[in-house]
C-alpha cells in the first residue's frame, strides 16, 4: 500500500527511513533480544539510547554546555504549568505575548500561578501577524517573557528573536523546533512536544539554562521539578522510553541530511512553493501577514467555503490527507514538517491548481 502524503499538524509525518529502522528493530534492538519497549529505563541498553539521543540533539542545535536537556512527558500543555512553577523563582508576574490559540492556552494556565501581563497581542487582527517588539509593554519585575514561536493553528512564526535583556526568554517551539538552526543561548528555556518534527507523541523536550533551575515553587511536584529531573538524567520517573528511542533515530536522520542548515534550506523551498501559488490565486486565501508566515503550518481558505468538502474529498482520493483546518478557525491547513518531501507539496499545489481551474470559473 502506498503511503499517503500526510499533512497532519501532529502527530505528524516521520521520515520513512526512521519508521523502517524502528520496524526492523522492533523485536530485537542491536542483539539485546528485547524491544526498546520492553527495556528497563535504568538498564545499560536504554541508558545508552538516551545518552546518544541527547548527544545528537546537542550537536544539531549546538546546545551550550550550561544548558540541561530534559526528555519529559505531558506535552506543551503540561509545560504551560511547569514553566511558571520553575521559572517564577519568587516573582509574582510573567510576561506573555499572545499570538494565537496556543499562546492563549499558555496564558490561561500560567494565570493559576502568577499574574500574567499580556505584553502584546495580535488578537485585534484575528492573530494574522506577530506584534513588533516596539509595541510590547513588558513588566519591570517579570520572572520571564513567554512566546509561542510558531503557532500551529494560525500559521504564525517568529523569524526573529525578541531581546528581553536580563529577563529569561521562554519559547514554546513545539511545531518548528529542528526546522532551522536556533541560537539557544538567546533563550532561557525552550520547550516543545515531540509530535511534529521530533518523533511520536508522548515525549516533551525541555532545554533550560543551568542558573534557572533549583528554585521551583515549594508546591511543585517532584516529577515537574527541572532540577530533580536534571539530576536524574530525565529519569526521576519512568520516561517515555520508546518515544525517546524514535526521537534519537530522527536526530540521526537530521544529521545525515546535512544538519539543520540544510533542513532549513529545504523547508524554505517547500514553503515557497505553496505560498507562491496562494499569492497568485484568486480562489484561495492566505490570511497571515507575509513576513510572519510559518514555514511549517500553512493555513488557507477557499473563498467559497461550500466547496471545502469537495476539496478535502478530492485531496484524499489523490493520497493527501489531514488538510482540514483546526476546528477553531476552519478552512484548510497544510503542515509541511521536515519529513514532508517536496514531492508532497508539489502534488498539493498541482491539485489546488486543478481544483481552482475546475471550480473557480
Image: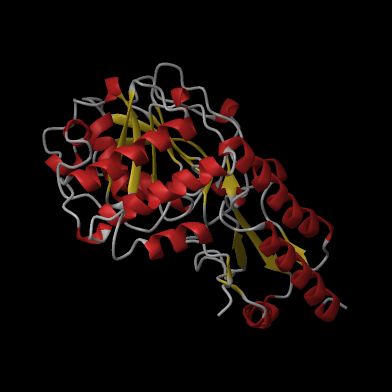
Percent x, y for residue 196?
Answer: 47, 54
Could you tell me if residue 294 is visible in this image?
A: yes
Q: Nearer the viewer, residue 287 or 269?
A: 269
> Residue shown at 55%/33% (left/top)?
181
Residue 99: tell me if it is visible.
no
Task: Locate the N terminus and report the quarter of the image it occupies.
Answer: bottom right
Image quarter hosting the C terminus: bottom right
Where on the picture, by quarter, is residue 344?
bottom right
Q: Please say if 180 is above or below 315.
A: above
Q: In the drawing, does residue 247 fall left or right of residue 335?
A: left
Q: Which residue is at the front of the view, 218 or 271?
A: 271
Q: Residue at x 39, y 49 (%)?
A: 247
282 on left or right of 134: right
In the picture, residue 212 is in which quadrant? top left
In this rendering, is residue 145 above or below 141?
below
Query: Residue placed at 62% from the left, 44% from the top?
Result: 129
Query: Where is 80 relative to 208, above or below?
Result: below
Residue under the image location 69 percent in, 51 percent down: 271
Q: Which residue is the extreme one toward the front?
A: 31
Q: Is residue 307 left or right of residue 71?
A: right
Extreme residue toward the top, this view: 166
Q: Position of residue 71 (x, y in %)?
A: 29, 43
Amino acid at each position: 500500500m502506498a503511503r499517503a502524503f500526510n499533512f497532519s499538524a501532529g502527530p505528524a509525518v516521520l521520515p520513512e527511513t526512521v519508521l523502517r529502522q524502528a520496524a526492523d528493530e522492533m523485536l530485537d534492538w542491536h542483539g539485546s533480544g528485547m524491544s526498546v519497549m520492553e527495556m528497563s529505563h535504568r538498564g545499560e541498553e536504554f541508558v545508552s539510547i538516551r545518552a546518544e539521543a541527547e548527544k545528537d540533539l546537542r550537536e544539531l542545535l549546538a546546545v551550550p554546555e550550561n544548558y540541561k536537556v530534559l526528555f519529559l512527558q505531558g506535552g506543551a500543555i503540561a509545560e504551560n504549568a511547569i514553566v511558571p512553577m520553575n521559572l517564577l523563582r519568587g516573582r509574582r508576574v510573567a510576561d506573555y505575548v499572545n499570538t494565537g490559540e496556543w499562546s492563549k492556552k499558555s496564558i490561561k494556565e500560567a494565570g493559576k500561578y502568577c499574574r500574567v501581563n499580556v505584553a502584546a497581542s495580535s488578537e485585534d487582527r484575528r492573530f494574522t501577524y506577530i506584534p513588533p517588539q516596539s509595541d510590547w509593554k513588558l513588566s519591570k519585575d517579570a520572572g520571564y517573557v513567554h512566546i509561542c514561536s510558531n503557532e500551529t493553528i494560525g500559521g504564525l512564526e517568529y523569524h526573529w528573536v525578541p531581546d528581553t535583556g536580563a529577563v529569561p526568554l521562554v519559547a514554546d517551539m513545539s511545531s518548528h523546533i529542528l526546522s532551522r538552526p536556533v541560537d539557544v543561548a538567546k533563550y532561557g528555556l525552550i520547550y516543545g512536544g515531540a509530535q511534529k518534527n521530533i518523533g511520536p507523541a508522548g515525549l516533551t523536550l525541555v532545554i533550560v539554562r543551568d542558573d534557572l533551575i533549583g528554585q521551583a515553587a515549594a508546591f511543585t511536584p517532584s516529577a515537574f521539578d527541572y532540577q530533580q529531573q536534571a539530576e536524574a538524567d530525565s529519569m526521576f520517573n519512568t520516561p517515555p522510553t520508546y518515544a525517546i528511542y524514535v526521537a534519537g533515530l530522527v536526530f540521526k536522520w537530521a544529521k545525515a541530511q546535512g544538519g539543520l542548515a540544510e533542513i532549513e534550506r529545504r523547508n524554505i523551498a517547500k514553503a515557497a512553493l505553496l505560498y507562491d501559488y496562494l499569492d497568485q490565486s484568486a480562489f484561495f486565501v492566505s490570511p497571515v501577514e507575509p513576513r510572519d508566515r510559518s514555514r511549517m503550518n500553512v493555513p488557507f481558505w477557499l473563498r467559497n467555503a461550500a466547496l471545502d468538502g469537495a476539496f478535502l474529498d478530492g485531496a484524499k482520493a489523490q493520497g493527501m490527507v489531514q488538510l482540514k483546518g483546526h476546528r477553531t478557525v476552519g478552512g484548510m491547513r497544510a503542515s509541511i514538517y521536515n519529513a514532508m518531501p517536496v514531492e508532497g507539496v508539489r502534488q498539493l499545489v498541482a491539485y489546488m491548481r486543478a481544483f481552482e481551474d475546475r471550480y473557480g470559473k
